[in-house]
Amino acid sequence: MKQIILVFVAILLLAVPALAQEQLGRIEGRVVTEDGKAVFGATVELTGRSLVAGKLSSTTDEKGRFRFQLLPVGSYNIKVTADQYQTYEQTGIVINIGATVSITPVLSVGAFEQVISITGEAPIIDVKSTAVSESFTQDIISKLPMPRFPYTAMTVAAGNVDGEYGSTMGGTERSNAYMLDGIDVSDPGTHTPWTFINIESIEEMEVMPIAGATADVGNFTGASLNMVTKSGGNDFTGGIAYYYFNDSFITWNTDDEDLRDDMTREAGNNDFTGFFGGPIKKDSVWFFGNVGWRKTMSLLREQELTYEYRSSPPPSPAT
């Protein structure tokens, strides 16, 4: 019995590095007056489409400080109210994977009904993290000239060398780690991606090279790709997408016939995906589902090779 317990504890300890990489962010700050004095007892409300509850609330302490933790990636708005001060509102506060955003709402003396609004995306200045990483939001992913495959984000991140999965910091393509919602999805034998994930199911990706990694990230010597899947929302949303090209869209990058004989070139691609999400119960439980089908054709020594797969990532957990 004692041996079984020891083995179980060892398995848990080995699993810690895989589960440790942060998926959530936080917003913190200090509410002050125009002359820099702390505002005690101010009410700070946080809203955003990524919040299942719809709204979170906090009260500032004697030093005017407040904090919201464990926030999913997304855009947020805050509203600060206090007696004898004008209401302060700020929109477009963007939280990336594992980021800490610090803000300082400044309250002006005035009637409670008066509102000071700051609109626009706030620049992310993470004063807590020493990590060096690059984030890819869904908006950036949709605009990048990259294959519709999330692991290829490694090849377009700064400092990475092109390849099927990208190599960085002197490592090879097998020196990387791949995390999906905090779970290591790297092949334990080859250290290449183990799962086929539809890129339309990804909310945000973060590429972190080993040189800029934090102590809670391990099991790689190149770079880590940290992916966060989409979730539902209080509104029903869905869509379908289809991407296509054939060999007439691209050409060889060399005129040397001998080199062409040893090169593999993607000759065609059919990529279909559909997704749907929404509330099971508003402000309580959401769902999200995604299905995909992809067919890729490559030319190797003028022979056509066809690959086909279907993907359906696990549904987002109910919250």
Image (cartoon, rainbow, N blue to C red):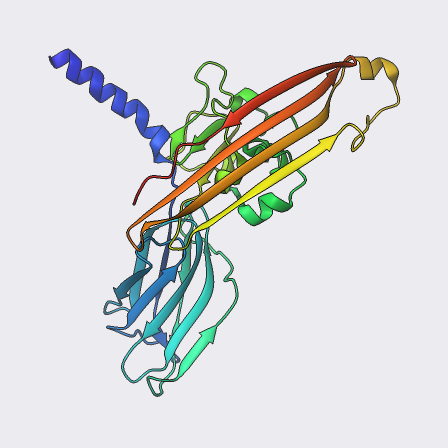
Q: Position of residue 6 (x, y in %)?
A: 18, 17
The quarter of the picture where the N terminus appears is top left
**Where is 242 relative to 219, above or below?**
below
Q: Position of residue 126 (x, y in %)?
A: 45, 53
**Where is 92 relative to 87, above or below?**
above
Query: Is residue 156 shown left or right of residue 208?
Result: right
Residue at left 59%, top 25%?
Answer: 170
Residue at left 50%, top 28%?
Answer: 311
Residue at left 31%, top 29%?
Answer: 16
Any part of residue 206 in sight: no
**Where is 226 relative to 47, above or below?**
above
**Where is 144 relative to 209, above or below?**
below
Any part of residue 292 in sight: yes
Residue at left 56%, top 42%?
Answer: 240
Q: Position of residue 296 (x, y in %)?
A: 65, 24
Residue 316 location, quadrant? top left
